[in-house]
């Protein structure tokens, strides 16, 4: 490569510093061109830590920079649509942190912008925790190894919000996170990946906010909590099976994190805390550990995939804007149901 791929960074939060910046830096021919974080001081600190050539006064300067070929957006969801559309309009490739946007409307605006400029790569950072077994589970479902699909269950229970005195986080602020509720979106994206083109026919959800106000960490002023502390979702598919999801940030007992796929002949249980997969068959009746199909075990390669799509025209699969808009549609329907007292809504 005689011409380096120059990437500008808007926002340098935890995942950007942990994954994006070091991994882009390690790719030959990639230049960390400019960064804009929440303040000039924090921008300069990130630039010094990762050897970024310049800092920018605001995100618009990164988008307008003629020395930038691609933009990595590592901010909270409330900024994603505006920044992404502006970057694509400016001729920049875009890697946007998940969740895609605050709402389906915003996600749709991003998708339309990406479709307007098909020569540009538009990618959402994918749900990563199932990479190890994704191909194995997808192949078993496609081949009917489990028999007729009956249920998919997801549960993520933590006590992160059990203490009512803890400050509000951006995930609890609907103005910043939008209609994204706890970790629902990232888990649904995983289910969506496993099921391919299948979307539910209907969605029904109930939720509750137990602590309606929390203090702002900087000002101490009380702010309204707009995101449920607990959420239960049921989605029905035309094939007859159901998706059942349970999330809580106020579980005072032991944390639990797992996914389960039940068919008429066998079941898979994915313990996400230990990254372990187990299978139970009707014939055997006992659970046994299951290894990934040889040669299919996935791992994080988000930055490498983004660069490969730009350089080689590789199609974006993890995760395309089309798939992002699909999971944002699910998020919208869940929000619509829980805010209407659990009314069943068509997908």
Image (cartoon, helix red, strand yellow):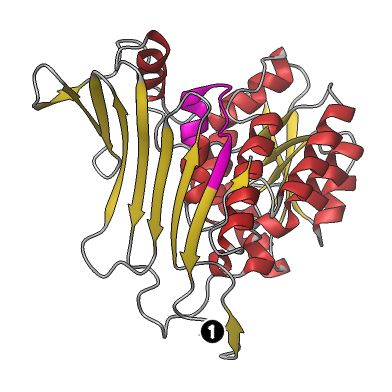
Position of residue 107 measured from the top left corner of the image (x, y, whole percent): 74, 44
Total numbered labels:
1
The quadrant holding residue 27 is: top right
Q: Is residue 202 magenta?
A: yes
Q: In front here: 127 or 157? A: 157
The quadrant holding residue 305 is: top right
Q: Residue at x 75, y 27 (%)?
A: 121
Does residue 97 show up? no
Label 1 SS = strand
Q: In front here: 220 or 241? A: 241
Q: Residue at x 64, y 40 (%)?
A: 347
Does residue 280 show up? yes
Q: In front here: 161 or 192? A: 192
Q: In front here: 290 or 12? A: 290
Image position of 105 with respect to 175: above or below: above
Q: How many residues crowd mark 1 within 10 Å: few (<14), some (14–19), many (20+)? A: some
Position of residue 186 measured from the top left corner of the image (x, y, whole percent): 50, 44
Q: Residue at x 60, y 91 (%)?
A: 221
Q: Quadrant of the N terminus?
A: top right
């Amino acid at each position: 490569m005689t011409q380096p791929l120059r990437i500008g960074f808007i926002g340098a939060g935890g995942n950007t510093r942990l994954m994006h910046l070091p991994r882009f830096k390690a790719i030959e021919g990639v230049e960390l061109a400019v960064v804009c974080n929440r303040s000039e001081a924090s921008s300069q600190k990130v630039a010094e830590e990762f050897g970024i050539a310049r800092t920018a006064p605001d995100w618009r300067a990164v988008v307008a920079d003629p020395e930038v070929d691609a933009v990595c957006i590592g901010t909270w969801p409330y900024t994603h649509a505006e920044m992404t559309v502006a970057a694509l309009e400016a001729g920049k490739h875009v890697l946007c942190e998940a969740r895609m946007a605050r709402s389906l409307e915003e996600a749709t605006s991003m998708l339309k912008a990406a479709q307007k400029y098909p020569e540009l790569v538009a990618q959402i950072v994918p749900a990563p925790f199932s990479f190890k077994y994704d191909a194995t589970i997808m192949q078993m479902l496609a081949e009917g190894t489990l028999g007729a699909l009956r249920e998919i269950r997801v549960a993520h229970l933590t006590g992160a919000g059990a203490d009512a005195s803890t400050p509000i986080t951006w995930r609890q602020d609907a103005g910043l996170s939008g209609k994204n509720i706890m970790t629902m979106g990232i888990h649904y994206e995983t289910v969506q990946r496993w099921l391919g083109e299948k979307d539910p026919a209907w969605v029904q959800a109930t939720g509750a906010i137990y602590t309606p106000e929390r203090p702002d960490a900087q000002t101490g002023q009380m702010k309204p909590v707009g995101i449920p502390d607990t959420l239960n979702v049921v989605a029905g598919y035309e094939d007859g099976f159901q998706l059942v999801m349970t999330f809580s940030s106020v579980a005072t007992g032991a944390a639990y994190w797992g996914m389960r796929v039940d068919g008429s002949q066998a079941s898979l249980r994915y313990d996400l805390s230990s990254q372990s997969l187990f299978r139970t068959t009707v014939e055997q009746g006992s659970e046994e550990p299951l290894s990934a199909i040889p040669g299919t075990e996935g791992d994080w390669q988000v930055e490498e995939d983004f660069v490969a799509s730009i350089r080689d025209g590789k199609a974006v699969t993890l995760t395309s804007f089309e798939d992002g808009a699909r999971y944002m549609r699910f998020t919208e329907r869940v929000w619509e149901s829980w805010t209407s007292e659990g009314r069943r809504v068509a997908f």
